[in-house]
Image (cartoon, rainbow, N blue to C red):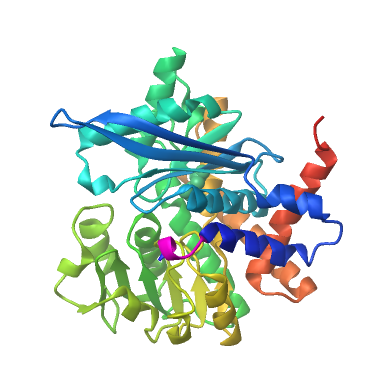
Protein backbone atom coordinates (compact mmCIF):
# COMPACT_ATOMS: atom_id res chain seq x y z
CA UNK A 1 0.00 0.00 0.00
CA UNK A 2 0.96 3.63 -0.33
CA UNK A 3 2.85 3.93 2.97
CA UNK A 4 5.47 1.45 1.76
CA UNK A 5 5.94 3.07 -1.61
CA UNK A 6 7.00 6.63 -2.10
CA UNK A 7 4.30 7.72 -4.51
CA UNK A 8 5.96 11.10 -4.99
CA UNK A 9 9.04 9.36 -6.40
CA UNK A 10 6.65 7.31 -8.51
CA UNK A 11 5.11 10.51 -9.95
CA UNK A 12 8.55 11.98 -10.57
CA UNK A 13 9.73 8.84 -12.34
CA UNK A 14 6.70 9.01 -14.64
CA UNK A 15 7.61 12.61 -15.45
CA UNK A 16 11.23 11.73 -16.23
CA UNK A 17 10.14 8.83 -18.45
CA UNK A 18 7.91 11.24 -20.35
CA UNK A 19 10.59 13.90 -20.72
CA UNK A 20 12.57 11.51 -22.92
CA UNK A 21 9.85 11.79 -25.56
CA UNK A 22 9.76 15.57 -25.55
CA UNK A 23 12.41 17.58 -27.35
CA UNK A 24 12.94 21.03 -25.98
CA UNK A 25 12.29 20.13 -22.36
CA UNK A 26 15.44 21.53 -20.77
CA UNK A 27 16.78 20.08 -17.48
CA UNK A 28 15.78 23.35 -15.78
CA UNK A 29 12.22 23.05 -17.02
CA UNK A 30 12.02 19.40 -15.93
CA UNK A 31 13.15 20.51 -12.45
CA UNK A 32 10.37 23.10 -12.40
CA UNK A 33 7.77 20.46 -13.25
CA UNK A 34 9.21 17.82 -10.91
CA UNK A 35 8.53 19.84 -7.74
CA UNK A 36 5.33 21.38 -6.37
CA UNK A 37 5.38 25.17 -6.39
CA UNK A 38 3.86 25.48 -2.90
CA UNK A 39 3.47 23.08 0.05
CA UNK A 40 1.59 24.16 3.13
CA UNK A 41 1.56 22.01 6.29
CA UNK A 42 -0.85 22.94 9.06
CA UNK A 43 -1.17 21.55 12.60
CA UNK A 44 -4.42 22.64 14.12
CA UNK A 45 -6.53 21.89 17.20
CA UNK A 46 -10.09 20.58 17.23
CA UNK A 47 -12.36 20.34 20.26
CA UNK A 48 -13.73 16.80 20.37
CA UNK A 49 -17.24 15.93 21.55
CA UNK A 50 -15.95 14.90 24.99
CA UNK A 51 -14.34 18.32 25.48
CA UNK A 52 -10.77 17.17 24.90
CA UNK A 53 -8.53 18.86 22.32
CA UNK A 54 -6.83 16.93 19.54
CA UNK A 55 -4.24 18.28 17.13
CA UNK A 56 -4.47 17.17 13.50
CA UNK A 57 -1.98 17.55 10.67
CA UNK A 58 -3.16 18.66 7.24
CA UNK A 59 -1.64 19.81 3.96
CA UNK A 60 -2.45 21.76 0.83
CA UNK A 61 -0.03 21.35 -2.03
CA UNK A 62 -0.15 23.37 -5.25
CA UNK A 63 1.93 21.78 -7.96
CA UNK A 64 1.81 24.14 -10.93
CA UNK A 65 -0.35 27.09 -11.94
CA UNK A 66 0.99 27.83 -15.43
CA UNK A 67 -2.32 27.06 -17.13
CA UNK A 68 -4.67 28.56 -14.55
CA UNK A 69 -5.72 28.40 -10.90
CA UNK A 70 -4.76 25.15 -9.19
CA UNK A 71 -7.46 22.54 -8.69
CA UNK A 72 -7.76 19.32 -6.78
CA UNK A 73 -9.52 17.39 -4.09
CA UNK A 74 -9.17 17.12 -0.33
CA UNK A 75 -8.54 13.68 1.11
CA UNK A 76 -9.19 12.50 4.68
CA UNK A 77 -7.19 9.32 5.29
CA UNK A 78 -5.00 8.02 8.14
CA UNK A 79 -2.04 7.33 5.87
CA UNK A 80 -1.72 10.58 3.90
CA UNK A 81 1.48 12.58 4.13
CA UNK A 82 3.09 15.51 2.36
CA UNK A 83 4.73 13.23 -0.24
CA UNK A 84 1.58 11.45 -1.29
CA UNK A 85 -0.30 14.76 -1.33
CA UNK A 86 2.41 16.24 -3.57
CA UNK A 87 2.20 13.29 -5.96
CA UNK A 88 -1.57 13.67 -6.13
CA UNK A 89 -1.15 17.41 -6.81
CA UNK A 90 1.26 16.67 -9.66
CA UNK A 91 -1.14 14.15 -11.19
CA UNK A 92 -3.88 16.82 -11.03
CA UNK A 93 -1.69 19.14 -13.12
CA UNK A 94 -1.30 16.54 -15.88
CA UNK A 95 -4.95 15.49 -15.62
CA UNK A 96 -6.27 19.03 -16.12
CA UNK A 97 -3.86 19.52 -19.02
CA UNK A 98 -4.87 16.24 -20.74
CA UNK A 99 -8.54 17.25 -20.40
CA UNK A 100 -7.47 20.70 -21.61
CA UNK A 101 -9.31 22.55 -18.88
CA UNK A 102 -7.72 25.81 -17.67
CA UNK A 103 -6.32 24.66 -14.34
CA UNK A 104 -3.09 23.62 -12.71
CA UNK A 105 -2.95 20.87 -10.10
CA UNK A 106 -3.31 20.83 -6.32
CA UNK A 107 -4.31 18.45 -3.55
CA UNK A 108 -5.14 18.76 0.12
CA UNK A 109 -5.36 16.21 2.89
CA UNK A 110 -5.75 15.63 6.59
CA UNK A 111 -4.20 12.66 8.32
CA UNK A 112 -7.16 11.01 10.05
CA UNK A 113 -9.72 8.27 9.77
CA UNK A 114 -12.99 10.17 9.21
CA UNK A 115 -15.00 7.13 10.38
CA UNK A 116 -13.62 7.66 13.91
CA UNK A 117 -15.10 11.17 14.21
CA UNK A 118 -18.71 12.23 14.77
CA UNK A 119 -20.39 14.52 12.24
CA UNK A 120 -20.05 17.48 14.62
CA UNK A 121 -16.33 16.76 15.06
CA UNK A 122 -15.86 16.42 11.31
CA UNK A 123 -17.58 19.75 10.79
CA UNK A 124 -15.34 21.53 13.33
CA UNK A 125 -12.24 19.84 11.85
CA UNK A 126 -13.19 20.83 8.30
CA UNK A 127 -13.98 24.44 9.21
CA UNK A 128 -10.70 24.86 11.09
CA UNK A 129 -8.67 23.21 8.29
CA UNK A 130 -10.40 25.42 5.70
CA UNK A 131 -9.51 28.47 7.78
CA UNK A 132 -5.86 27.35 8.06
CA UNK A 133 -5.39 26.79 4.32
CA UNK A 134 -7.62 29.68 3.24
CA UNK A 135 -4.52 31.87 2.89
CA UNK A 136 -3.75 30.06 -0.36
CA UNK A 137 -7.29 29.25 -1.56
CA UNK A 138 -9.63 31.30 -3.77
CA UNK A 139 -11.82 30.94 -6.85
CA UNK A 140 -9.05 32.56 -8.91
CA UNK A 141 -6.12 30.82 -7.20
CA UNK A 142 -6.85 27.33 -5.81
CA UNK A 143 -10.18 25.49 -5.78
CA UNK A 144 -10.67 22.32 -3.68
CA UNK A 145 -13.13 19.48 -4.33
CA UNK A 146 -13.97 16.10 -2.76
CA UNK A 147 -11.58 13.14 -2.80
CA UNK A 148 -11.20 9.97 -0.72
CA UNK A 149 -12.94 10.40 2.66
CA UNK A 150 -14.72 13.70 1.84
CA UNK A 151 -18.05 14.45 0.16
CA UNK A 152 -20.43 17.27 -0.88
CA UNK A 153 -21.22 18.03 2.80
CA UNK A 154 -17.50 18.60 3.46
CA UNK A 155 -17.42 21.02 0.53
CA UNK A 156 -20.50 22.85 1.85
CA UNK A 157 -18.71 23.45 5.19
CA UNK A 158 -15.63 24.76 3.36
CA UNK A 159 -17.71 27.05 1.17
CA UNK A 160 -19.62 28.36 4.21
CA UNK A 161 -16.45 28.88 6.27
CA UNK A 162 -14.75 30.92 3.55
CA UNK A 163 -17.97 32.82 2.81
CA UNK A 164 -18.44 33.74 6.48
CA UNK A 165 -14.88 34.98 6.72
CA UNK A 166 -15.25 37.07 3.57
CA UNK A 167 -18.68 38.37 4.47
CA UNK A 168 -20.03 37.28 1.11
CA UNK A 169 -21.40 34.03 -0.28
CA UNK A 170 -18.71 32.72 -2.61
CA UNK A 171 -19.93 29.72 -4.59
CA UNK A 172 -16.84 29.29 -6.76
CA UNK A 173 -14.29 28.70 -3.98
CA UNK A 174 -14.88 24.95 -3.97
CA UNK A 175 -16.56 22.40 -6.27
CA UNK A 176 -18.36 19.13 -5.65
CA UNK A 177 -20.85 21.04 -3.50
CA UNK A 178 -24.45 19.97 -2.87
CA UNK A 179 -26.87 20.99 -5.65
CA UNK A 180 -28.68 23.36 -3.24
CA UNK A 181 -25.48 25.33 -2.91
CA UNK A 182 -24.20 25.93 -6.40
CA UNK A 183 -23.19 22.33 -7.02
CA UNK A 184 -23.50 20.96 -10.55
CA UNK A 185 -25.95 18.32 -11.61
CA UNK A 186 -23.98 15.26 -12.67
CA UNK A 187 -20.94 16.01 -10.46
CA UNK A 188 -21.46 13.10 -8.05
CA UNK A 189 -21.52 10.59 -10.90
CA UNK A 190 -18.93 12.37 -13.06
CA UNK A 191 -15.76 10.45 -12.22
CA UNK A 192 -17.46 7.06 -12.55
CA UNK A 193 -19.14 8.18 -15.77
CA UNK A 194 -15.78 9.23 -17.21
CA UNK A 195 -14.26 5.87 -16.24
CA UNK A 196 -17.03 4.03 -18.08
CA UNK A 197 -16.77 6.22 -21.19
CA UNK A 198 -13.02 5.51 -21.18
CA UNK A 199 -13.67 1.77 -20.86
CA UNK A 200 -16.08 1.97 -23.79
CA UNK A 201 -13.51 3.74 -25.99
CA UNK A 202 -10.77 1.31 -24.96
CA UNK A 203 -12.98 -1.65 -25.87
CA UNK A 204 -13.22 -0.27 -29.39
CA UNK A 205 -9.40 -0.29 -29.72
CA UNK A 206 -9.28 -3.86 -28.49
CA UNK A 207 -12.17 -5.09 -30.60
CA UNK A 208 -13.81 -6.16 -27.40
CA UNK A 209 -17.50 -5.85 -26.64
CA UNK A 210 -18.46 -3.96 -23.51
CA UNK A 211 -21.79 -5.71 -23.57
CA UNK A 212 -21.35 -8.95 -21.69
CA UNK A 213 -17.78 -8.11 -20.61
CA UNK A 214 -16.88 -9.36 -17.12
CA UNK A 215 -15.81 -6.50 -14.88
CA UNK A 216 -14.10 -6.44 -11.46
CA UNK A 217 -14.12 -3.19 -9.48
CA UNK A 218 -11.78 -2.61 -6.53
CA UNK A 219 -13.22 0.11 -4.26
CA UNK A 220 -16.87 0.95 -3.68
CA UNK A 221 -16.56 4.64 -2.84
CA UNK A 222 -17.84 7.40 -5.08
CA UNK A 223 -15.80 6.33 -8.12
CA UNK A 224 -16.03 2.53 -7.90
CA UNK A 225 -19.71 2.33 -6.99
CA UNK A 226 -20.84 4.69 -9.77
CA UNK A 227 -18.55 3.05 -12.34
CA UNK A 228 -19.95 -0.37 -11.38
CA UNK A 229 -23.53 0.88 -11.68
CA UNK A 230 -23.02 2.62 -15.03
CA UNK A 231 -21.03 -0.18 -16.64
CA UNK A 232 -23.72 -2.66 -15.57
CA UNK A 233 -26.26 -0.34 -17.16
CA UNK A 234 -24.29 -0.53 -20.41
CA UNK A 235 -24.65 -4.31 -20.46
CA UNK A 236 -21.42 -5.44 -18.80
CA UNK A 237 -21.46 -8.04 -16.02
CA UNK A 238 -19.91 -6.82 -12.77
CA UNK A 239 -18.63 -10.06 -11.27
CA UNK A 240 -16.75 -8.63 -8.28
CA UNK A 241 -16.59 -5.50 -6.15
CA UNK A 242 -14.67 -4.73 -2.97
CA UNK A 243 -14.13 -2.12 -0.31
CA UNK A 244 -11.42 -1.62 2.32
CA UNK A 245 -12.70 -4.59 4.37
CA UNK A 246 -13.10 -7.17 1.60
CA UNK A 247 -14.98 -8.09 -1.52
CA UNK A 248 -17.73 -10.19 -3.02
CA UNK A 249 -17.85 -12.29 -6.16
CA UNK A 250 -20.54 -13.88 -8.25
CA UNK A 251 -19.63 -15.55 -11.51
CA UNK A 252 -22.87 -14.62 -13.29
CA UNK A 253 -22.80 -10.98 -12.13
CA UNK A 254 -23.70 -9.04 -8.98
CA UNK A 255 -26.93 -6.99 -8.64
CA UNK A 256 -25.25 -3.56 -8.54
CA UNK A 257 -28.13 -1.19 -9.31
CA UNK A 258 -30.78 -3.48 -7.86
CA UNK A 259 -29.19 -4.05 -4.45
CA UNK A 260 -25.57 -3.14 -3.81
CA UNK A 261 -25.45 0.51 -4.88
CA UNK A 262 -28.32 1.61 -2.66
CA UNK A 263 -27.21 -0.50 0.26
CA UNK A 264 -23.46 0.08 0.37
CA UNK A 265 -22.36 3.07 -1.74
CA UNK A 266 -21.45 5.97 0.54
CA UNK A 267 -22.66 4.08 3.63
CA UNK A 268 -20.89 2.78 6.67
CA UNK A 269 -21.69 -0.90 6.11
CA UNK A 270 -19.23 -3.16 4.35
CA UNK A 271 -19.76 -5.28 1.24
CA UNK A 272 -18.40 -8.18 3.28
CA UNK A 273 -21.80 -8.23 5.07
CA UNK A 274 -23.55 -9.15 1.81
CA UNK A 275 -24.41 -12.83 1.99
CA UNK A 276 -25.68 -13.70 -1.50
CA UNK A 277 -22.21 -13.90 -3.05
CA UNK A 278 -18.82 -15.50 -2.40
CA UNK A 279 -16.53 -13.59 -0.07
CA UNK A 280 -13.15 -12.66 -1.56
CA UNK A 281 -10.23 -10.46 -0.52
CA UNK A 282 -8.99 -7.45 -2.45
CA UNK A 283 -6.02 -9.53 -3.49
CA UNK A 284 -8.31 -12.29 -4.86
CA UNK A 285 -10.16 -9.63 -6.85
CA UNK A 286 -7.02 -8.59 -8.75
CA UNK A 287 -6.44 -12.18 -9.87
CA UNK A 288 -9.96 -12.90 -11.09
CA UNK A 289 -10.58 -14.17 -14.57
CA UNK A 290 -12.28 -11.12 -16.05
CA UNK A 291 -12.15 -8.77 -19.06
CA UNK A 292 -11.96 -5.37 -17.38
CA UNK A 293 -10.39 -4.47 -14.04
CA UNK A 294 -11.19 -1.09 -12.51
CA UNK A 295 -8.95 -0.25 -9.54
CA UNK A 296 -10.88 2.56 -7.83
CA UNK A 297 -9.43 2.66 -4.32
CA UNK A 298 -6.03 3.99 -3.22
CA UNK A 299 -2.60 4.57 -4.75
CA UNK A 300 -0.13 1.73 -5.27
CA UNK A 301 -2.68 -1.07 -4.87
CA UNK A 302 -1.21 -3.07 -7.76
CA UNK A 303 2.51 -3.60 -7.28
CA UNK A 304 5.22 -5.92 -8.57
CA UNK A 305 4.03 -8.44 -5.96
CA UNK A 306 0.52 -8.88 -7.34
CA UNK A 307 0.64 -7.52 -10.92
CA UNK A 308 1.64 -10.93 -12.25
CA UNK A 309 -1.69 -12.47 -11.36
CA UNK A 310 -3.89 -9.90 -13.17
CA UNK A 311 -5.88 -11.70 -15.87
CA UNK A 312 -7.98 -8.81 -17.19
CA UNK A 313 -7.38 -7.65 -20.76
CA UNK A 314 -8.08 -4.03 -19.91
CA UNK A 315 -7.33 -2.01 -16.76
CA UNK A 316 -9.07 1.35 -16.33
CA UNK A 317 -7.65 3.42 -13.48
CA UNK A 318 -10.50 4.92 -11.46
CA UNK A 319 -8.17 5.74 -8.55
CA UNK A 320 -5.19 8.05 -8.68
CA UNK A 321 -1.94 6.14 -9.05
CA UNK A 322 -3.26 2.61 -8.37
CA UNK A 323 -0.37 0.98 -10.28
CA UNK A 324 3.28 1.34 -9.33
CA UNK A 325 5.72 1.77 -12.27
CA UNK A 326 6.87 -1.87 -11.74
CA UNK A 327 3.28 -3.08 -11.97
CA UNK A 328 2.80 -0.95 -15.06
CA UNK A 329 5.73 -2.65 -16.76
CA UNK A 330 4.50 -6.13 -15.80
CA UNK A 331 1.02 -5.47 -17.19
CA UNK A 332 2.47 -4.05 -20.38
CA UNK A 333 4.59 -7.18 -20.87
CA UNK A 334 1.47 -9.25 -20.46
CA UNK A 335 -0.20 -7.25 -23.26
CA UNK A 336 -2.80 -5.70 -20.95
CA UNK A 337 -4.03 -2.26 -22.02
CA UNK A 338 -3.91 0.24 -19.13
CA UNK A 339 -5.99 3.42 -19.40
CA UNK A 340 -4.16 5.79 -17.05
CA UNK A 341 -5.73 7.76 -14.20
CA UNK A 342 -4.95 11.19 -15.67
CA UNK A 343 -7.20 10.30 -18.59
CA UNK A 344 -9.64 7.75 -17.18
CA UNK A 345 -10.64 9.46 -13.94
CA UNK A 346 -10.65 13.03 -15.27
CA UNK A 347 -14.46 13.11 -15.37
CA UNK A 348 -14.62 14.41 -11.79
CA UNK A 349 -12.45 17.43 -12.32
CA UNK A 350 -14.05 18.09 -15.71
CA UNK A 351 -17.49 18.44 -14.12
CA UNK A 352 -15.84 20.40 -11.28
CA UNK A 353 -14.75 22.78 -14.01
CA UNK A 354 -18.32 22.95 -15.33
CA UNK A 355 -19.53 23.60 -11.78
CA UNK A 356 -17.01 26.43 -11.32
CA UNK A 357 -18.02 28.00 -14.65
CA UNK A 358 -21.70 27.80 -13.63
CA UNK A 359 -20.92 29.33 -10.21
CA UNK A 360 -18.91 32.20 -11.68
CA UNK A 361 -21.60 33.06 -14.22
CA UNK A 362 -24.50 32.34 -11.84
CA UNK A 363 -26.23 30.38 -14.57
CA UNK A 364 -26.89 26.67 -14.18
CA UNK A 365 -27.19 23.89 -16.72
CA UNK A 366 -29.46 20.86 -16.76
CA UNK A 367 -28.03 17.40 -16.13
CA UNK A 368 -28.21 16.34 -19.74
CA UNK A 369 -26.13 19.28 -20.84
CA UNK A 370 -23.48 18.43 -18.22
CA UNK A 371 -23.35 14.75 -19.20
CA UNK A 372 -23.25 15.44 -22.94
CA UNK A 373 -20.40 17.95 -22.51
CA UNK A 374 -18.53 15.56 -20.21
CA UNK A 375 -18.80 12.62 -22.60
CA UNK A 376 -17.74 14.73 -25.55
CA UNK A 377 -14.68 15.99 -23.70
CA UNK A 378 -13.72 12.51 -22.46
CA UNK A 379 -14.00 10.98 -25.93
CA UNK A 380 -12.01 13.84 -27.41
CA UNK A 381 -9.21 13.44 -24.81
CA UNK A 382 -9.19 9.70 -25.39
CA UNK A 383 -8.82 10.24 -29.14
CA UNK A 384 -5.91 12.64 -28.61
CA UNK A 385 -4.16 10.16 -26.31
CA UNK A 386 -4.74 7.36 -28.78
CA UNK A 387 -3.15 9.25 -31.66
CA UNK A 388 -0.20 10.30 -29.49
CA UNK A 389 0.24 6.63 -28.59
CA UNK A 390 0.48 5.73 -32.25
CA UNK A 391 2.71 8.66 -33.10
CA UNK A 392 5.21 8.03 -30.29
CA UNK A 393 4.77 4.25 -30.20
CA UNK A 394 4.27 4.25 -26.45
CA UNK A 395 1.81 2.90 -23.95
CA UNK A 396 -1.26 4.91 -23.05
CA UNK A 397 0.12 6.36 -19.78
CA UNK A 398 3.18 7.80 -21.47
CA UNK A 399 1.01 9.13 -24.31
CA UNK A 400 -1.30 10.91 -21.85
CA UNK A 401 1.71 12.21 -19.94
CA UNK A 402 3.25 13.49 -23.20
CA UNK A 403 0.13 15.55 -23.88
CA UNK A 404 -0.17 16.81 -20.31
CA UNK A 405 3.47 17.64 -19.73
CA UNK A 406 3.80 19.26 -23.15
CA UNK A 407 0.84 21.57 -22.55
CA UNK A 408 2.12 22.62 -19.13
CA UNK A 409 5.70 23.06 -20.37
CA UNK A 410 4.54 25.18 -23.30
CA UNK A 411 2.44 27.40 -21.02
CA UNK A 412 5.40 27.79 -18.66
CA UNK A 413 7.76 28.68 -21.50
CA UNK A 414 5.51 31.18 -23.19
CA UNK A 415 4.75 32.88 -19.87
CA UNK A 416 8.50 32.97 -19.11
CA UNK A 417 10.16 32.64 -15.75
CA UNK A 418 9.39 35.61 -13.49
CA UNK A 419 11.02 38.13 -13.06
N1 LIG B 1 -10.49 14.45 -6.39
C1 LIG B 1 -10.82 14.35 -7.77
C2 LIG B 1 -9.60 13.95 -8.57
O1 LIG B 1 -8.68 13.38 -8.06
C3 LIG B 1 -11.51 15.58 -8.29
C4 LIG B 1 -10.74 16.87 -8.19
C5 LIG B 1 -11.58 18.09 -8.55
O2 LIG B 1 -12.72 17.95 -8.93
O3 LIG B 1 -11.03 19.18 -8.43
O4 LIG B 1 -9.57 14.10 -9.76
Residue 53 x %, y %: 23, 30
* 402 to 119, vertically: above or below: below
Tell which residue pokes out farthest to the right in this image: 24
Where are the magenta residues, as a range?
Answer: 2-6
Residue at the farthest top position: 167
Residue 143 magenta-highlighted: no
Q: Residue at x 37, y 59 (%)?
A: 226
| Residue at x 13% of width, y 31% of height | 50
Quadrant occupied by the C terminus: top right
Considering depth in this image, is 262 or 118 the residue closer to the camera? 118
**Magenta stretch, overall SS:** helix
Q: Is residue 68 above or below residue 222?
A: above
Front residue of 267/55: it is 55
Q: Residue 151 is drawn in which quadrant?
A: top left
346 vs 408, nearest the viewer? 408
The answer to whether 283 is drawn above or below residue 143 in the figure is: below
Quarter-of-image position of residue 18: bottom right
In which quadrant will I find the N terminus?
A: bottom left
Residue at 20% x, 62% y is 270
Q: Residue 60 location, x and y as percent? A: 50, 38
User: Residue 147: x, y in percent?
Assistant: 42, 48
Quadrant assignment, res 203: bottom right
Q: Is residue 178 above or below residue 308?
A: above
Residue at 40% x, 73% y is: 235
List x then y, in percent, for residue 280: 25, 78
Q: Is residue 105 visible?
A: yes
> Residue 362 vs residue 45: left or right?
right
Amino acid sequence: MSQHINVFEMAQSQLRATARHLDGLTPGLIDVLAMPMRQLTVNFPVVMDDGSVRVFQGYRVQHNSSRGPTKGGIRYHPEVDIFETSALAMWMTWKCAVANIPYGGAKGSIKLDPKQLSDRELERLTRRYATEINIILGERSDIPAPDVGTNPQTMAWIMDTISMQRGQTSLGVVTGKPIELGGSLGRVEATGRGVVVTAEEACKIMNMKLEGARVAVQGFGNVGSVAAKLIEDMGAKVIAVSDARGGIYRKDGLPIAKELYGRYAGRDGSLADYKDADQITNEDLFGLDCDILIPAALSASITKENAGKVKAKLVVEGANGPLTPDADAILEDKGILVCPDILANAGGVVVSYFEWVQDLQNFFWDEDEVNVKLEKLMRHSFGAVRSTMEQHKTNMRTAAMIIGVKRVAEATMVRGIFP
